[in-house]
């Protein structure tokens, strides 16, 4: 079963190049994204809402035009293996999730999803084989309506130069940039 336009092995190579390794969440996310895209009406301009920061957003970025850079990929940190693809203008779309009730034939996937084994105890080769064999059979789809007002879709607005650091920043943040008012997570190295 293909992941988007790719054979499993091709997508696995893409995952390694983009993500650093073929993470199970990215591989399963490829199937989730594929299933959700197939359920969308043809020609709809869509955005994505992913419910974890772990691996799944990378599958969306590899298979769709949605990315954090173009602000069409939104992440809600719920810790769920789930994503929604939805019409950019109406919010109507499809939510795809791994359904634990469908994992019976796939014990290694279940152990990974439910964290029943430590990473050291997992059989990576078996897990990968089961993901490839299961494909979209472990994915449940559900029509959804995303509340567009809850997504950060606003423009940064006009910019100014911070009088403290001399860098540009959105004026909506105040009279100084956030790095100067809140403290940046970096410091100049010598």
Image (cartoon, grey):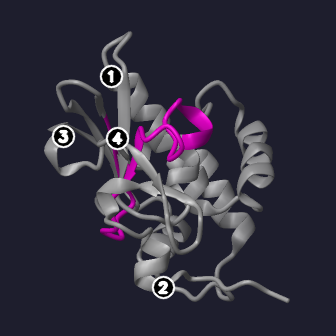
Q: Is residue 67 left or right of residue 86?
A: right
Q: Which residue is mark 1?
A: 40
Sequence-first tag of 3 and 2: 3
> Callout 3: helix, strand or loop?
helix
How crowded pointer 4 is (Cα within 10 Å; few <14, some 14-19, many 20+) is rated as few
> Callout 2: helix, strand or loop?
helix
Residue 76 is covered by the magenta coloring: yes
How crowded pointer 2 is (Cα within 10 Å; few <14, some 14-19, many 20+) is rated as few
Q: Which mark is residue 183?
A: 2
Q: Which residue is mark 4?
A: 155
- Predominant secondary structure, magenta span: loop
Mark 1–mark 3 Cα distance, whole angstroms, equals 17 Å
Mark 3–mark 2 Cα distance, whole angstroms, equals 31 Å
Tell me residue 50's x, y (percent).
38, 52
Q: Which of the 4 image quadrants contains residue 113?
A: bottom left
Whether residue 147 is visible: no
């Amino acid at each position: 079963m293909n992941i988007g336009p790719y054979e499993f092995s091709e997508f696995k190579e893409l995952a390694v190049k983009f993500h650093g390794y073929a993470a199970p969440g990215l591989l399963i996310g490829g199937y989730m994204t594929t299933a959700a895209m197939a359920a969308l009406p043809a020609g709809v301009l869509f955005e994505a809402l992913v419910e974890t920061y772990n691996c799944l957003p990378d599958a969306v970025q590899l298979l769709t035009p949605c990315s954090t850079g173009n602000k069409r990929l939104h992440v809600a940190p719920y810790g769920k293996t789930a994503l929604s693809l939805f019409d950019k203008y109406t919010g109507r779309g499809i939510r795809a999730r791994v359904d634990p009730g469908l994992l019976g034939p796939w014990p290694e996937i279940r152990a990974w999803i439910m964290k029943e084994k430590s990473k050291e105890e997992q059989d990576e080769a078996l897990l990968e084989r089961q993901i490839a064999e299961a494909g979209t059979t472990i994915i449940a789809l559900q029509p959804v309506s995303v509340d567009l007002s809850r997504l950060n879709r606003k423009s940064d607005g006009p910019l100014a130069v911070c009088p403290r650091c001399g860098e540009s920043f959105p004026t909506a943040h105040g009279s100084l940039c956030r790095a100067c008012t809140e403290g940046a997570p970096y410091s100049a190295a010598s």
